[in-house]
Image (cartoon, rainbow, N blue to C red):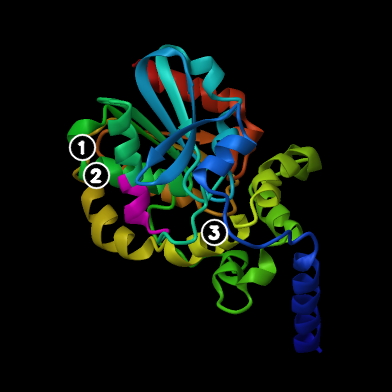
């Protein structure tokens, strides 16, 4: 009886996931993106058009988003940090309004290289790097590889230790059937799983996050490539964890107390492993602390940046 119910549940889940799947085809090129979004700023990094925003004047402060979100996730954080800082947010390759090429390998190393070339392009020396989720892994790896180039580091709900991914992520990675789970219903489910209370992720907000998946025919293919090629575990075990105890860059670790995707214990471990670190728990929030408690996130970032 249980097995039958489980099978029916999987079939139902797959059926719902197909709703609103959107088109599939070649990704929009850099020139096509610039034409479609004339109000957006782009920079070419190794032939890939990367969307970014820039505000303020002063010390460079760079924000890197996580899985399934974009630079939009920082919209309620950055306006209060522009005094004395030049604030950059960027959309990672394959996300937001950045290019989503199907001929690139979506490896962790490539993202770290792209971040470095973004910094070099704008001649941003001694930046403060802020990363959320997989963006935290990217900025952490860049910092570990170039500790003398980073002034401060902020890690928000960052998966820097290994744990088996949730079933929803494993479904996306699965060959042959993964494309069944790139429809709007399933992506909305993943985004809503990042907050403690669903009303904090209303349909209007979900539609904004999903806009690139409707605008770009190659967006969902790029999402699958990311899920299958962005393999963190070897880097976590062989490079990140062994080096954390040697990291001397001042580091702030920020975590939602109800994070359902990256355990709060990971944040506590980072506080123990990184010698020069501080740890802030954002109460009454899940994985997307920027959506649930933006004023508190902005407060702890501002205090750390100005120290």
Q: Is residue 100 visible to us here?
A: yes
- The reply to whether the C-beta atoms of the residues labelled 2 and 3 are less than 8 Å apart is no
Residue at which label 2 appears:
144
The residue sitting at 50% across, 40% down in the picture is 91
- The reply to whether the C-beta atoms of the residues labelled 3 and 1 are less than 8 Å apart is no
From the viewer's side, name the closer residue of 264 and 168: 168
- Tag 3 or tag 2, which sits nearer the N-term? 2
- Tag 1 or tag 3, which sits nearer the N-term? 1
Q: How far separated are the C-alphas under marks 3 and 1?
A: 31 Å
Q: In this view, does 97 lie to the left or right of 52?
A: right
With respect to residue 114, does 58 lie above or below? above
How crowded pointer 1 is (Cα within 10 Å; few <14, some 14-19, many 20+) is rated as: some
* Image quadrant occupied by the C terminus: top left
Q: Is residue 97 visible to us here?
A: no
User: Magenta-highlighted stretch: main secondary structure?
Assistant: helix
Looking at the rendered structure, the secondary structure element under dot 2 is: helix
Q: Where is residue 60 in the image (x, y as percent from the top left)?
A: 35, 22
Q: How many marks?
A: 3
Residue at which label 1 appears:
147
- The reply to whether the C-beta atoms of the residues labelled 2 and 1 are less than 8 Å apart is yes
The residue sitting at 28% across, 30% down in the picture is 250
Residue 107 quadrant:
bottom left
Q: Position of residue 59 (x, y in %)?
A: 34, 17
Tell me if residue 111 is in the magenta stretch.
yes
How crowded pointer 2 is (Cα within 10 Å; few <14, some 14-19, many 20+) is rated as: some
Q: What stretch is highlighted in magenta?
A: 106-113
């Amino acid at each position: 009886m249980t097995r039958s119910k489980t099978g029916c549940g999987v079939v139902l889940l797959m059926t719902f996931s197909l709703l609103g799947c959107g088109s599939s085809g070649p990704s929009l090129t850099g020139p096509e993106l610039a034409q479609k979004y004339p109000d957006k700023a782009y920079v070419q990094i190794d032939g890939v058009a990367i969307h970014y925003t820039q505000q303020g004047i002063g010390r460079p402060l760079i924000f890197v988003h996580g899985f399934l979100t974009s630079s939009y996730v920082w919209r309620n954080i950055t306006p209060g940090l522009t005094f004395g800082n030049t604030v950059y947010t960027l959309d990672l390759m394959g996300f937001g309004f950045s290019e989503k090429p199907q001929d690139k390998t979506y490896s962790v190393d490539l993202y770290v290289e792209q971040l470095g070339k973004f910094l070099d392009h704008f001649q941003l020396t001694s930046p403060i790097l802020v990363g959320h989720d997989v963006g935290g892994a990217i900025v952490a790896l860049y910092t570990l590889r170039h500790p003398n180039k980073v002034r401060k580091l902020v890690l928000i709900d960052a998966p820097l230790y290994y744990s088996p991914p949730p079933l929803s992520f494993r479904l996306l990675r699965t060959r042959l059937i993964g494309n069944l789970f790139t429809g709007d219903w399933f992506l909305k489910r993943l985004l809503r799983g990042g907050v403690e209370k669903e009303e904090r992720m209303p349909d209007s907000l979900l539609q904004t996050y999903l806009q690139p998946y409707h605008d770009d025919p190659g967006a969902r293919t790029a999402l699958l490539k990311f899920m299958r090629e962005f393999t963190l575990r070897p880097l976590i075990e062989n490079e990140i964890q062994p080096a954390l105890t040697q990291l001397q860059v001042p580091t702030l670790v920020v975590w939602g107390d109800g994070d359902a995707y990256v355990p709060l214990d990971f944040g506590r471990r980072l506080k123990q492993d990184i010698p020069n670190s501080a740890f802030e728990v954002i109460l009454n929030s899940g994985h997307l602390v920027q959506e649930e408690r933006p004023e508190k996130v902005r407060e702890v970032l501002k205090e750390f940046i100005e120290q």
